[in-house]
Image: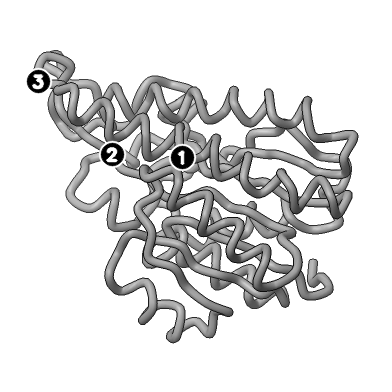
Amino acid sequence: MNTDSRTAIVTGSAQGIGKAIAERLIADGNEVVLLDIADHVRQTAHEIKAAGSLQVDIRDLESLRAAVHGVGHEHGRLDILVNCAGTCGRESFEELSPATWNRDIETNLTATAFACQAAVFPYMRAQGRGRLVNVASVSGKVGGIGPVDPDGGGGRSGAAYAAAKAGTINLTRWIARQVGTWGITCNTVAPGPIASPMAAGADYGVGSLPIPRLGEPREVAGAVSYLVSSDADYTTGACIHVDGGSVLA
């Protein structure tokens, strides 16, 4: 699946799944710029030999747009955008606050929409080719992953997160319908319970899954690698589950 060197942005790439995706895209021969709010994003970029890094709060849409356009301008092209940045509240529905709702919707859904917009216009559309991959979650398919506690606790991914990831899956389909004639594909990867910092401390009840273990970030990265490769030229609007069978359980 190696490709000619292309320019890629991966958001939420200072650690966890985003870092694994960036590492895989670099191994595939791409020039990857990391974009993350974390202070250590520059250290991660140095560690994995990324082409660059930007510390950005993606909920600040003007800063997000400026970052995406800046990468495209500096490299003269923008071929791949992977939206992986996310937040996940785990409050019960009774305890859900407007602050948590707004944070998770803005980070997981709103920023994804406007990062895609900034990548497509002008860069991908002008090039006549591009790859958009949005990292959702099977939470957006089943209403949160993890055992259901009657009181709403137990660590299941929260209502705002599930709503945002469901929105991401449908947003991806909407964009795919718009951009296909411009040579751009837009797809979703939906991880299940993955051993990452976001999942730390949560009980996902993986023993009941068809593949009874936590997934690994590299397994999500493999799906992304396929979707940005030439093997996926005829794949758009798809949602690939990397979930050990969570949506089957």
Question: Mark 3: which amino acid?
Answer: Glu
Where residue 95 is drawn, which disc sits there? 3
Sooner in the amino-acid sequence: mark 2 or mark 1: 2
Distance CA(mark 3)–CA(mark 1): 25 Å
Sooner in the amino-acid sequence: mark 3 or mark 1: 3
Name the one closer to the observer, 53 or 245: 53
Where residue 111 is drawn, which disc sits there? 1
Looking at the image, residue 181 sits to the left or right of residue 166; the answer is right
> Which residue is depicted at the point 59% across and 23% down?
170
Looking at the image, residue 64 sits to the left or right of residue 239; the answer is left
Name the one closer to the observer, 170 or 179: 179
Question: Mark 1: which amino acid?
Answer: Ala
Q: Judging from the image, what secondary structure is the residue with disc 2 in?
A: loop
Name the residue carrying label 2.
Answer: 88
Question: Mark 2: which amino acid?
Answer: Cys
Q: Position of residue 143 (x, y in %)?
A: 38, 20
- Residue 62's place in the image compared with 144, above or below, is below
Q: Judging from the image, what secondary structure is the residue with disc 3 in?
A: loop
